[in-house]
Amino acid sequence: MRDFLIRVFYFYYNGFRSMTVGRKLWMIILVKLFFMFVILKIFFFPDLLKKNFSTDRERSDYVIESLTQIK
């Protein structure tokens, strides 16, 4: 199993090392992921539980109530 994982690692390592255009594409992908997970979270997804409740107990009670509430 260990030998298989080492072969898989070197397969990808050698493949990425010999890339020319692929490096630029991976940089674009990483920048987009950074933008999606960091920038958008800061501006569009505020921490409503921390803003609306002051203690962890109140937050946990709200979450449990929301999950177990029958609609």
Image: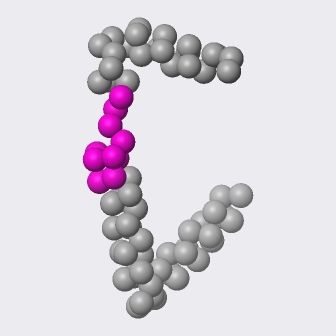
Kindly indicate the quadrant of the structure image that contains residue 57.
top left
Total of numbered circles in the picture? Answer: 0
Left or right: where 63 falls relative to 38: right
Q: Say if 36 sits above or below 60 in the image.
A: below
Q: Residue furthest front?
A: 71
In reply to whether residue 24 is colored magenta, the answer given is: no
Q: Say if 43 sits above or below 57 in the image.
A: below
Left or right: where 18 falls relative to 7: left
In reply to whether residue 40 is colored magenta, the answer given is: yes
**Whole-percent x, y for residue 66 in the image:** 56, 19
Q: Is residue 17 visible?
A: no
Magenta stretch: dominant secondary structure: helix
Residue shown at 38% from the left, 13% from the top: 56
Which of the pair 40/5 is nearer the observer? 40
Q: Say if 12 sits above or below 4 in the image.
A: below
Residue shown at 63% from the left, 63% from the top: 5
**Whole-percent x, y for residue 29 in the image:** 42, 71
Which of the pair 38/1 is nearer the observer? 38
Q: Is residue 33 visible?
A: yes
Residue shown at 63% from the left, 16% from the top: 69
Q: Residue furthest right?
A: 1
**Whole-percent x, y for residue 63 in the image:** 51, 19
The magenta region covers 39-48
Left or right: where 6 falls relative to 55: right
Kindly indicate the quadrant of the structure image that contains residue 53.
top left
**Whole-percent x, y for residue 59 in the image:** 42, 16
Which of the pair 36/4 is nearer the observer? 36
Which quarter shows the C terminus? top right
Q: Residue furthest bottom?
A: 20
Which quarter shows the N terminus? bottom right
Residue shown at 60% from the left, 66% from the top: 6
What colouring style does the render use?
one colour
